[in-house]
Image: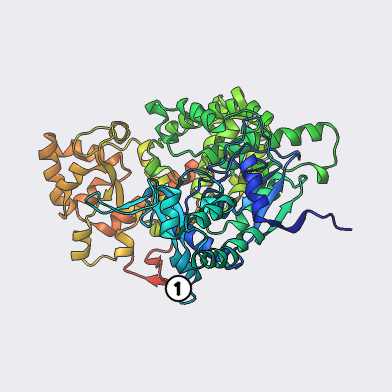
């Protein structure tokens, strides 16, 4: 028999508002602030007065194992010690709007149509409310906090600042909806005149009674509903809002134990604020939580293995959303310090691989398993042999282009695979064995959108690429934030003029890291011409310029002869060799001279052959 996980009933609006006021119904901390503008509230009030359905309220019954930090609905002021009986998962905007406009004896703090903060009171024009030819919504007025309507000169146009003025203008303050004394005052003000009493009774029966009789459909999840289900339900019913991150949800969960996750994350980030950790500046709080979760789940699996649990029953290593949502505060506190150190070690490792700039970081996602690997392997990852293995794994991930799209499953494999490999296992990680780089891929790498493109940039820096004008190492220019980028060796304008295929000359083979000033000297000129310009600008010999060109794995002799095809083929082979060395495995040689793969076509396209 299926277990009942929720109940459905109808509850009087008045009872719900009383529970809000008493703090029996509150909000989980992950609920965002109240944002409805006053016209939306007026529309909601009009719908209730007409007994129209306005949706359901979804609550989570309190008292279960899953605890969230909570706060009162805006405007309610229960005592600090009041623990809620239920938390609002859906219906916050409607409940807050109704509570502030009907049950709060202070101005409603809301927004106007332009989302500017405004405060005021909701009134109903009694005469308009009874006029069948009037739209009910038009009968509801939003009056400033002073209860006076003024013009741009500050002159009072309408004044409802006393009950007597309300009576005389026949406008009903909705804050008095559940207070019968206003009607008595209205009757006395008009001396119980028949016309006034007829207006009051008609207004009371057609406008006020529907509020008193209105019942809200309420769905309440049981107190034993697991956190993952609560979060999933919350996001399903809040389709109009921004998806909650795992970080926000865990922040609310840990806050129930007086732990401020947001502040702790800020403290963790300060550990890598120094310039040498600039590569980490785009690491997000979710990235951090994924690395922590990888370690927590890996330890859980290790303990089960030592206890003799069968292979098929071992808990999985993982860092998907569902894994992070069940990360206990105890585990977070245990593994977070190691992850901070792991990210710092990852930054140092990437510097050794000549990856300095987040613009040229091949995969930000690969930082997550890298940090976890360093955290788990500890000092064992510091040896020269371990660093060589890590470098092979890293470059196989980059040039195998294995970290695009959904990557959590690869994280799960990489953590145990690489750590065991570092600790002496002869089995290579699956990322290493699965990675392949085809020679023909070089012809299709044209922009920084590709991880492999960024990887080649790093390999050129690692090869010692020096600026052709200054002689300064490219890595130094990057460190001091000079305008360094990848530019064409044979300029685009020259290639177009000489009939070369754009798909060929625009590939990474014909590009290299140079400063913006050096690139301006190159301009659109032939290499044979701009080499002389560079020597003059550098105040050095042509041989000195050529020596710097060789640090870019390019042949200056072929550039001096303006032989694009021979230059392209020679540099393609050299780049291919460097990629193979980084991966520790041969490149798949599927290159056919004269053939390229057009990004807009699925068939091979033949071009002029690459011949000397």
Which residue is found at the position 26% from the left and 65% from the top? 500
Residue 362: image location, x then y, percent: 45, 45
Quadrant position of residue 353? top left
Relative to the observer, which residue lies in front, 393 or 12?
12
> Camera-side residue: 405 or 296?
296
Q: How is the model colour-coded? A: rainbow
Q: Is residue 580 left or right of residue 325?
A: left
Q: Quadrant of residue 535?
A: top left
- Mark 1 Cα-neighbour bin, 10 Å: few <14, some 14–19, many ≥20: few
Quadrant in the rendering for residue 286:
top right
Image spot of residue 309 (x, y percent) = 85, 38
Q: Is residue 429 visible?
A: no
- The answer to whether residue 304 is seen in the rendering is yes
Q: Is residue 402 above or below residue 369?
A: below
Quadrant including the C terminus: bottom left
Name the spot of residue 517 as percent of width and height, x first.
18, 42
Q: Is residue 481 left or right of residue 18?
A: left
Name of the residue lying farthest toward the bottom: 133
Q: Read off the residue under disc 1.
A: 134
Above or below 446: residue 534 = above
Q: Dividing the image into 4 quarters, which one contains the N terminus? A: bottom right
Residue sitting at the far top: 379
x, y (%) of residue 484? 27, 41
Residue 142 vs 104, above or below: the answer is below
Q: Secondary structure at mark 1?
A: loop
């Amino acid at each position: 028999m299926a277990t009942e996980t929720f109940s459905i009933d109808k509850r009087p609006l008045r009872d719900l508002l009383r529970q809000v006021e008493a703090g029996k119904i509150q909000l989980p901390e992950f609920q965002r602030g109240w944002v409805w503008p006053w016209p939306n509230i007026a529309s909601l009030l009009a719908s209730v007065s007409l007994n129209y359905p306005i949706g359901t309220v979804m609550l989570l019954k309190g008292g279960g194992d899953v605890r969230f930090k909570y706060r009162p609905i805006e405007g309610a002021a229960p005592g600090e010690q009041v623990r809620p009986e239920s938390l609002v998962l859906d219906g916050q905007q409607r409940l807050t709007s109704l509570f502030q406009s009907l049950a709060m004896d202070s101005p409603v703090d809301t927004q106007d149509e332009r989302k500017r903060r405004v405060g005021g009171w909701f009134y109903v024009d009694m005469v308009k409310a009874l006029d069948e030819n009037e739209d009910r919504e038009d009968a509801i007025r939003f009056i400033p906090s002073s209860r006076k309507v003024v013009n741009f000169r500050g002159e009072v146009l309408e004044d409802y600042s006393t009950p007597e003025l309300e009576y005389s203008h026949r406008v009903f303050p909705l804050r008095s909806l559940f207070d019968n004394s206003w009607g008595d005052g209205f009757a006395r003000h008009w001396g119980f005149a028949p016309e006034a009493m007829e207006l009051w009774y008609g207004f009371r029966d057609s406008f006020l009674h529907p509020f008193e009789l209105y019942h809200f459909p309420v769905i309440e999840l049981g107190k034993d509903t697991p956190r993952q289900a609560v979060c999933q339900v919350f996001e399903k019913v809040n389709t109009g809002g921004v998806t909650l991150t795992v970080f926000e949800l865990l922040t609310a969960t840990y806050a129930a134990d007086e732990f401020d996750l947001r502040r702790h994350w800020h403290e963790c980030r300060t550990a890598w604020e120094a310039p040498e950790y600039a590569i980490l500046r785009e690491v997000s709080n979710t990235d951090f939580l994924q690395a922590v979760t990888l370690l927590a789940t890996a330890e859980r699996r290790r303990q089960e293995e030592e206890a003799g649990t069968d292979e098929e029953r071992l808990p999985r290593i993982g860092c998907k959303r569902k894994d992070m949502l069940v990360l206990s505060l105890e585990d977070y506190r245990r593994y977070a310090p190691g992850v901070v150190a792991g990210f710092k070690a990852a930054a140092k490792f990437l510097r050794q691989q000549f990856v300095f700039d987040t613009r040229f970081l091949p995969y930000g996602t690969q930082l997550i398993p890298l940090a976890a690997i360093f955290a788990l392997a500890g000092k064992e990852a510091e040896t020269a042999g371990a660093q060589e293995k890590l470098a092979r794994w890293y470059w196989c991930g980059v040039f195998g282009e294995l970290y695009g799209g959904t990557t959590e499953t690869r994280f799960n494999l990489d953590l145990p695979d690489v750590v065991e490999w570092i600790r002496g296992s002869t089995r290579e990680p699956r990322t290493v064995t699965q990675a392949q780089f085809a020679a023909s891929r070089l012809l299709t790498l044209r922009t920084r959108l590709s991880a492999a493109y960024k990887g080649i940039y790093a390999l050129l820096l690692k090869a010692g690429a020096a600026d052709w004008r200054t002689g300064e190492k490219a890595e130094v220019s990057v460190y001091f934030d000079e305008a360094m980028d990848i530019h064409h060796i044979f300029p685009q304008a020259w290639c177009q003029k000489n009939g070369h295929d754009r798909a060929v000359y625009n590939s990474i083979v014909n590009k290299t890291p140079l400063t913006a000033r050096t690139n301006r000297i190159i301009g659109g000129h032939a290499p044979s011409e701009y080499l002389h310009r560079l020597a003059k600008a550098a105040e050095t010999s042509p041989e000195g310029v050529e020596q710097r060109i060789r640090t870019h794995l390019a042949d200056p002799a072929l550039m001096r002869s303006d032989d694009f095809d021979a230059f392209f083929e020679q540099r393609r082979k050299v780049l291919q060799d460097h990629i193979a060395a980084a991966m520790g495995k041969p490149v798949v040689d599927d290159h056919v001279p004269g053939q390229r793969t057009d990004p807009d076509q699925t068939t091979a396209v033949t071009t002029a052959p690459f011949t000397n």
